[in-house]
């Protein structure tokens, strides 16, 4: 943060311009981010299922929704599922993104086109990712089971998305596929900012390829990589589309993450109060992750 | 300099990686051009038998479902929300980049907050708001919902981009007699085209992919967006896979074209702005 140093007051004319340009964005944020957040907090603190704001605000304040949510085993199960889903996606997606970034940092023919194709999964809507994987992992006619059977690794018709033992893996795989390009892009950009002279110096000193990676490459991309990890963790933690469109949280709640549970409470059971309370719990968790991650990030990038 | 054969070896590796990564898209395409009799097999051929290739599934899905209407709805929401978000975010991003005000911290906090709010939760207050304003089942409502997601991130992205343009540009323009707004319009914005392109394509792809808002705030099938329409196939008792894959491929095409053509802008735009601090 190099901003804080210059702390003069802006001249009046510039102040008008600065805030004038910001005004539309301020309206959007106040109306479409701030106001919804306020409604969520109000809903979480009031009993009943009122959807009309007037009725809602006439209810007494209380922590009943939070008590109900924190006392429900489904909440803690969803917490566990979210943790497994997030880490299960993060680690392989990071590894794949790093490998892709290191490879595409080299020069080779048709690199620009191949890079576009490699990053394409990012542009595929979550719902369509789900549909594609549902079909590939179909029990009888799916290509994955067919290949596994041909290789002799599978003898039964494993229903990946329906079997409660494999459903979590089945929803993690498409999520990895959709999220690795983000890691690849950010780390590729960081790699390109490392000066080539550092590698020349390392080679002159007789460093091996591994030593170059540990002492030149990794320190150069660590900050960007950690930021990408943090952002992707937040993204996966609240991910909804892929799970909803494939298992819907099933079978028997095996893939019910917090994001899915919130939606089911709100639009399945119409318990908006508990849904909002659960959402606030989610938000506080995410804030905790960000606070921890921010400190860690500052130390890492120092 | 890398030896020549090294470069071809890397190219081969890259082709292999891309082939593995794009297999799901390839498989959608293969399924969509084959008849059910071949597709519904316990040993589906990995390469499509060319004499069996037909586009019957495409004709069928367009005939039996309003895929084209869904895509038109999606396109309208994407166009509306991208234009609004980009305009608002460009002005705000420019202000944040050029003037140091307390708004910078607010903007950063808003960005983080909006990244943390799950869509499946935010949709509840939008549902309340739209029921009161009679905006449910309208594309205008969906545009507003998408703007709420787009503006915080796009603002930060544009700020990052404007940060890379030297301030001397405006000073020179002022010496030539421009006022601040003229300098922004005639000097800065033309130079910011790559950033605007990156930001626009980002916003468009996010809006095209959006699902929770579209599913919850719109109920009439005629008003569905393409993501909601395609998801509706899955719950059916007998999924017609070739038809579903055909619809999937068609719905991917617009964003794929946009992405492949503009991807260099996106990579440089993302990296000059959002990622670095």
Image (cartoon, rainbow, N blue to C red):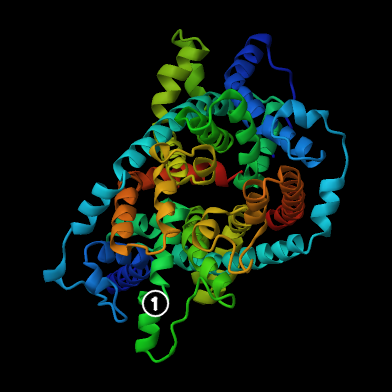
Residue B252: percent from left, percent from top = 34, 51
B173 w.r.t. B149: above or below: above
B19 w.r.t. B89: above or below: below
Which residue is nearer to you in this view: B123 or B149?
A: B123
Please tell me which residue is depicted at 70% across the width and 38% down the height of the picture. Answer: B109
The residue furthest front is B237
SS label for mark 1: helix
Please tell me which residue is depicted at 42% across the width and 72% down the height of the picture. Answer: A137
In the rendered view of the protein, which quadrant contains the N terminus of chain A?
A: top right
Mark 1 lies on residue: A144
Q: Residues within 10 Å of mark 1 (few under 14, many from 20)?
A: some
Residue A230: percent from left, percent from top = 64, 55
Which residue is nearer to you in this view: B270 or A169?
A: A169
Please tell me which residue is depicted at 31% across the width and 43% down the height of the picture. Answer: B66
Q: Is residue A210 visible?
A: yes
Please tell me which residue is depicted at 61% across the width and 35% down the height of the picture. Answer: B127
Which residue is nearer to you in this view: B276 or A265?
A: A265
Tell me if A74 is positioned left or right of B162 in this view.
right
The residue furthest top is B177
Number of marks in the rendered image: 1
Residue A133: percent from left, percent from top = 43, 66
Residue B72: percent from left, percent from top = 33, 36
Please identify the quarter of the rendering in which residue A142 is found.
bottom left
Which residue is nearer to you in this view: A22 or A26?
A: A26
Instruction: Provide the chain ID for the residue under circle 1.
Output: A
The residue furthest left is B51
Please identify the quarter of the rendering in which residue A273 is found.
top right
Q: Is residue A206 visible?
A: no
């Amino acid at each position: 943060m190099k901003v804080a140093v210059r702390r003069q007051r802006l001249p009046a004319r510039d102040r008008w311009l600065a805030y004038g340009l910001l005004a539309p964005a301020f309206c959007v944020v106040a109306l479409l981010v701030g106001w919804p957040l306020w409604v969520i907090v109000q809903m979480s603190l009031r009993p009943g299922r009122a959807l009309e704001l007037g009725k809602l605000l006439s209810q007494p304040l209380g922590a009943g929704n939070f008590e109900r949510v924190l006392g429900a085993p489904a909440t803690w199960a969803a917490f566990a599922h979210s943790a497994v889903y997030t880490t299960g996606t993060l680690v392989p997606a990071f590894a794949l993104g790093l490998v892709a970034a290191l490879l595409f940092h080299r020069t080779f023919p048709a690199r620009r086109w191949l890079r576009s194709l490699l990053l394409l999964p990012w542009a595929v809507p979550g719902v369509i990712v789900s549909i594609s994987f549902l079909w590939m992992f179909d029990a009888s006619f799916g290509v994955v089971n067919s290949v596994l059977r041909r290789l002799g690794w599978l003898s039964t018709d494993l229903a990946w998305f329906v079997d409660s033992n494999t459903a979590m893996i089945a929803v993690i795989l498409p999520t990895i596929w959709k999220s690795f390009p983000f890691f690849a892009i950010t780390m590729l950009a960081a790699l390109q900012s490392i000066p080539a002279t550092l590698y020349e110096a390392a080679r002159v000193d007789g460093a091996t390829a591994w030593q170059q990676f540990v002492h030149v490459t990794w320190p150069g991309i660590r900050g960007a990589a950690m930021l990408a990890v943090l952002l992707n963790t937040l993204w996966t933690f609240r991910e909804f589309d892929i799970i909803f469109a494939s298992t819907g949280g099933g079978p028997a709640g095996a893939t019910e993450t917090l994001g899915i549970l919130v939606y089911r409470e709100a639009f399945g059971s119409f318990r908006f109060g508990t849904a909002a309370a659960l959402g606030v719990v989610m938000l506080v968790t995410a804030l905790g992750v960000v606070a921890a991650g921010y400190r860690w990030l500052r130390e890492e990038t120092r | 300099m890398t030896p020549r054969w090294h470069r071809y070896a890397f190219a081969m590796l890259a082709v292999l990686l891309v082939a593995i990564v794009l297999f799901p898209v390839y498989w959608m395409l293969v399924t969509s051009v084959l008849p059910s009799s071949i597709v519904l097999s316990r040993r589906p051929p990995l390469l499509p038998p060319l004499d069996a290739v037909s586009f019957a599934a495409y004709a069928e899905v367009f005939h039996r479902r309003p895929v084209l209407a869904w895509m038109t709805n999606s396109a309208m929401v994407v166009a509306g929300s991208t234009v609004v978000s980009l305009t608002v975010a460009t002005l705000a991003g420019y202000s944040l980049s050029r003037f140091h005000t307390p708004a910078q911290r607010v903007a950063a906090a808003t960005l983080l907050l909006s990244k943390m709010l799950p869509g499946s939760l935010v949709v509840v207050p939008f549902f309340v708001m739209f029921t009161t304003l009679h905006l449910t089942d309208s594309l205008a409502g969906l545009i507003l919902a998408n703007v709420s997601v787009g503006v915080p991130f796009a603002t930060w992205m544009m700020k990052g981009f404007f940060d890379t343009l030297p301030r001397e540009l405006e000073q020179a323009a002022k010496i030539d007699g421009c006022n601040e707004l003229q300098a922004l319009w005639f000097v800065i914005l033309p130079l910011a085209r790559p950033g605007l392109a990156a930001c626009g394509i980002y916003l468009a792809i996010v809006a095209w992919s959006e699902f929770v808002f579209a599913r919850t705030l719109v109920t009439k099938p005629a008003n569905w967006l393409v993501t909601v329409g395609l998801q509706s196939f899955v719950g059916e008792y007998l999924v017609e896979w070739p038809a579903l894959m055909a619809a999937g491929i068609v719905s991917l095409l617009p964003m794929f074209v946009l992405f492949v053509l503009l991807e260099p802008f996106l990579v440089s735009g993302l990296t000059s702005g959002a990622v670095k601090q």
